[in-house]
Image: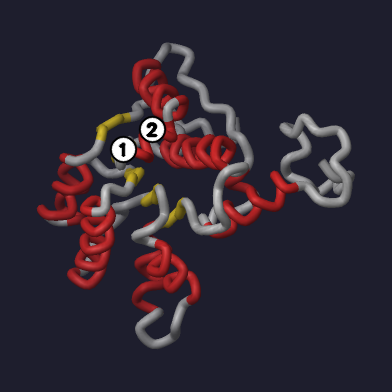
Amino acid sequence: MTENKECWLKNECNQKDCGDFCMRLFKLDYLYKEALISAQQRKHVALCIDADGTDEDAFIKLKNIENNIEDFIAQGKNLYIHSTNTGNGKSSWALRFVQTYFNKIWLKSSLRCKALFINVPRFLLALKENISDRSDYVAHIKENMLTADIIIWDDIATKQTSIFESEHLYSMIEARIAEGKSNIFTSNLTALEMHKSLGDRLYSRIVNLSQDIELNGADKRGI
């Protein structure tokens, strides 16, 4: 890698000196920017179960998905990770899958949007604002929504969605499912709250067409 101390790959790169240009850094930077994943979110986060073994089975299932992420995406599979507890790894696991995928494909990947990280509350707010003031953020998501290999729909339901919001989410998610594209959904709501928030059709698409993994561990933020 380069001698640039700001290189975020420096702790995991095996290259001692690759000159002024690093192809891996260049391509990964491109893939992450297109995915709307920040520099902070690119960092590898250590994920661990509670001392009493809570979530051990869930972590085994999630690790198996990570180890086979290319097949998971190629087969257009979907995953629903949920918990009523916050800070116990839902979003971190979802990001880990994209990190692993990028590390596997960066060399052979073309320069196009391969993944998207969509924080749903932020997207819905931007979607409404986009009616009167065009949003590049919304435009980028809509432009790549059908072609991205995988989309993370983070915090898919945090409140009661309006008809406008639920119809947009439904049409986007339904289109991806019809195209055989992979999706990962995360939520802090119970099944009943999720159903109430999203309505019958969207709830059915997410829950019934996804592998369902529930986390019950404690909040580990700051540990």
Q: Residue at x 30, y 30 (%)?
A: 214
Distance from the alpha carbon under mark 2 to that under mark 1: 6 Å
Report the residue marked by disc 1.
Answer: 75
16 sits left or right of 107 in the view:
right
Which residue is more in the foreground, 205 or 146? 146
Q: Is residue 50 above or below residue 36?
A: above
Q: How many callouts does the rendering have?
A: 2
Q: Residue at x 49, y 38 (%)?
A: 92
Q: Is any atom of residue 154 visible in this view?
A: no
118 sits left or right of 195 in the view:
right
User: Looking at the picture, which amino acid does disc 1 mark?
Assistant: Gln
Image quadrant occupied by the C terminus: top right
On residue 71, the disc is 2
Q: Position of residue 14 (x, y in %)?
A: 77, 30
| Residue located farthest toward the left when viewing the structure as drawn | 200
Secondary structure found at label 1:
loop
Q: Residue at x 42, y 27 (%)?
A: 68
Which residue is more in the foreground, 162 or 208? 208
Q: Position of residue 24 (x, y in %)?
A: 70, 44
Secondary structure found at label 2:
helix
Which residue is more in the foreground, 132 or 216? 132
Q: Position of residue 204 (x, y in %)?
A: 14, 47
Q: Counting other residues with Cα less than 10 Å from the Cα at mark 1, is it few (<14), some (14-19), or many (20 or more)?
A: few
